[in-house]
C-alpha cells in the first residue's frame, strides 16, 4: 500500500466502492456475513450483566463473587487471542472463524448440562469456553473488515460492522432481562431455565458455522502484508512500531473506561438523583446503550468524512470533558453527561483498532491478537475505579475514565506523525 494509507482521509466515493478491492472484486456479501459475527459477540456480552444479578440470587453469592462472571469472560479473551491470531496466520481467516464458531457453540450447549450440575464453577466454565470462541472471532473479524475493500476506508468498514455489535449488545441485555432476570423475582429462584438463551445461541452459531463452511470466504491480505510475503521481506517488528504500541495502550485504556462507565452508571444515577431506583437506572442505561449503537452507526459516516485519527481525538476530548462535568456536578445533568459519553465512546474501539493495525504488513494478524488481548484492561482497571469510588465517593471514581480518554485523545492527535515515522524506518 502506498503512503495514502497514512492520510486515511481520502475516502473513496460511493457505497459500492466501499467493498471493492483494487482487482475490481466486490465483497459486500462477505462483509454482511462477517457482520453476523459482530452481532453474535455483542449479544453474548449483553447477557453478562444479567447473569451477575441472577447468580447473586440463585446461588446466594456475594457481589464480589458474581464479578467472576466478567473475569471468566475477559480471561477467555486474554488467553485465546494470541493463539487465535497465530492460527489465522497459519491457516487463514476462514479456518480461524470456523474454530471460533465451534468453540462458541460448544460453550453455549454446555449450559444444558451445567444447569443440571448447578454449580457456579460449571457456569463459569461455559462462559470461559464461549469467550475463547468469541476471542477467535473478534481477533479475526476486526482486521478482516479492513481488507474487504480499499485500505483507506478500513476504519469506515470496521465502524459499520461494529454497529451490529451494538445492536447485539442491546438485544442481549433486553432478552436476558426477560428470560434470566424475570426468574429472580420468584420466591424460589433457580437456574433450571438458564440454558434457554444459550440453547438459542448454540443453534444460531451452528447455523452460522454451516454457512461459513460452505461460503467463499477469501483469505485476503492487507496490501503491505501481501507485498511483504510476495517479496519474501519482513516488515518492521511490532514492538518498534510506535503507532501500534501506543494503540495497544489506548485500546487497553479505552476498554477500561468503557467497562467502568458501563459498570457504575446505575450506581452514579442512584446516588445523584433523589428517589432513583436500580430499575429506573437500568432503564436509563438501556437508553444510553441505544445512543452507543446510534453513535456507531453515525460513526461510520464521521470517519468517512474526517480523518479517523482526528475524529478519535475529538470524541476522546469531548468524553474527557463530560467526565469532568459528571465529577463536578450531579443530578440529571451529570447523568445526562454520562449518557452522552456512550455516544462518544462508540467509534473508539473500532477506530483505535483500524489505526493500530495500519501498515503492519505480515504482522497484521499477530497485531490483531495483541489488540484483542488488551481488553483485559476492563478487568484490571474497573476494580480500581470501584476502590476509588469506595474511598472518595462515586463521582470521584470517574477520574479513571477521564484520564483514559485524555491518553486516547493524545494518541489520535499524534497518530499521523507516529505512523509516518514507522513507515519511513
Image (cartoon, helix red, strand yellow):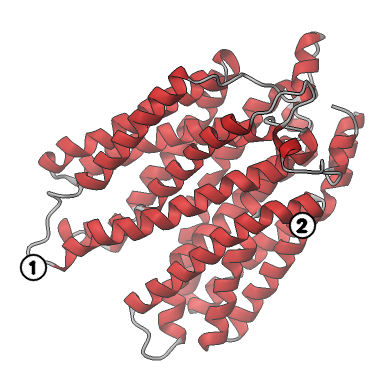
* Identity of the residue drawn at 47% across and 85% down: 272
Q: Residue pushed farthest bottom?
A: 274
Give the position of the C terminus as an image quadrant: top right
Q: Residues within 10 Å of mark 1 (few under 14, many from 20)?
A: few
Q: Are marks 2 and 1 in contact (CB under 8 Å)?
A: no
Say which element carries label 1.
Answer: loop
Looking at this view, is 382 or 348 the one in front?
348
* Identity of the residue drawn at 50% across and 64% down: 290
Q: Quadrant of residue 220?
A: top right
* Identity of the residue drawn at 89% across and 29% down: 2
Q: Is residue 191 above or below residue 26?
A: below
Residue 358 position, x and y percent, is 76, 35
Looking at this view, is 347 or 209 the one in front?
209
Total of numbered circles in the picture?
2
Q: Quadrant of residue 316?
A: bottom right
For residue 187, the mark is 1
* Residue assigned mark 2: 311
Q: Is residue 159 above or below residue 204?
A: below
Give the position of the N terminus as an image quadrant: top right
Looking at this view, is 206 or 353 the one in front?
206
Residue 400: tell me if it is visible: no
Q: Residues within 10 Å of mark 2 (few under 14, many from 20)?
A: many
Amino acid at each position: 500500500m502506498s503512503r495514502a494509507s497514512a492520510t486515511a482521509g481520502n475516502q473513496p466515493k460511493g457505497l459500492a466502492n466501499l467493498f471493492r478491492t483494487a482487482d475490481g472484486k466486490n465483497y459486500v456479501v462477505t462483509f454482511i456475513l462477517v457482520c453476523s459475527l459482530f452481532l453474535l459477540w455483542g449479544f453474548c456480552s449483553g447477557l453478562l450483566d444479567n447473569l451477575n444479578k441472577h447468580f447473586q440470587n440463585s446461588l446466594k453469592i456475594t457481589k464480589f463473587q458474581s464479578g467472576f462472571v466478567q473475569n471468566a469472560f475477559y480471561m477467555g479473551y486474554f488467553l485465546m487471542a494470541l493463539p487465535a491470531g497465530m492460527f489465522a496466520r497459519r491457516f487463514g481467516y476462514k479456518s480461524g472463524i470456523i474454530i471460533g464458531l465451534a468453540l462458541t457453540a460448544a460453550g453455549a450447549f454446555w449450559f444444558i448440562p451445567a444447569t443440571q450440575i448447578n454449580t457456579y464453577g460449571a457456569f463459569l466454565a461455559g462462559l470461559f469456553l464461549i469467550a475463547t470462541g468469541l476471542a477467535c472471532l473478534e481477533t479475526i473479524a476486526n482486521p478482516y473488515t479492513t481488507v474487504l475493500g480499499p485500505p483507506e476506508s478500513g476504519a469506515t468498514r470496521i465502524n459499520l460492522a461494529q454497529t451490529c455489535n451494538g445492536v447485539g449488545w442491546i438485544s442481549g441485555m433486553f432478552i436476558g432481562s426477560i428470560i434470566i432476570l424475570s426468574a429472580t423475582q420468584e420466591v424460589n429462584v433457580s437456574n433450571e431455565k438458564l440454558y434457554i438463551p444459550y440453547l438459542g445461541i448454540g443453534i444460531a452459531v451452528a447455523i452460522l458455522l454451516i454457512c461459513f463452511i460452505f461460503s467463499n470466504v477469501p483469505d485476503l491480505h492487507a496490501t503491505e502484508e501481501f507485498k511483504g510475503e510476495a517479496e519474501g521481506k519482513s516488515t518492521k517488528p511490532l514492538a518498534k512500531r510506535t503507532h501500534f504500541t501506543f494503540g495497544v495502550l489506548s485500546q487497553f485504556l479505552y476498554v477500561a473506561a468503557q467497562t467502568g462507565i458501563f459498570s457504575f452508571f446505575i450506581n452514579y444515577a442512584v446516588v445523584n438523583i433523589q428517589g432513583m431506583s436500580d430499575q429506573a437506572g437500568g432503564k436509563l442505561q438501556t437508553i444510553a446503550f441505544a445512543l452507543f449503537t446510534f453513535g456507531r452507526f453515525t460513526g461510520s459516516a464521521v470517519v468517512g468524512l474526517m480523518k479517523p485519527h482526528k475524529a478519535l481525538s475529538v470524541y476522546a476530548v469531548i468524553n474527557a470533558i463530560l467526565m469532568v462535568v459528571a465529577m463536578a456536578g450531579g443530578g440529571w445533568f451529570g447523568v445526562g453527561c454520562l449518557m452522552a459519553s456512550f455516544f462518544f465512546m462508540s467509534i473508539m474501539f473500532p477506530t483505535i483498532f483500524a489505526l493500530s493495525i495500519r501498515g503492519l504488513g505480515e504482522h497484521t494478524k499477530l497485531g490483531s491478537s495483541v489488540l484483542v488481548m488488551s481488553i483485559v484492561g476492563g478487568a484490571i482497571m474497573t476494580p480500581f475505579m470501584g476502590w476509588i469510588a469506595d474511598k472518595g465517593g462515586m463521582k470521584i471514581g470517574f477520574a479513571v475514565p477521564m484520564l483514559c480518554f485524555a491518553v486516547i485523545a493524545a494518541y489520535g492527535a499524534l497518530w499521523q506523525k507516529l505512523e509516518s515515522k514507522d513507515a519511513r524506518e
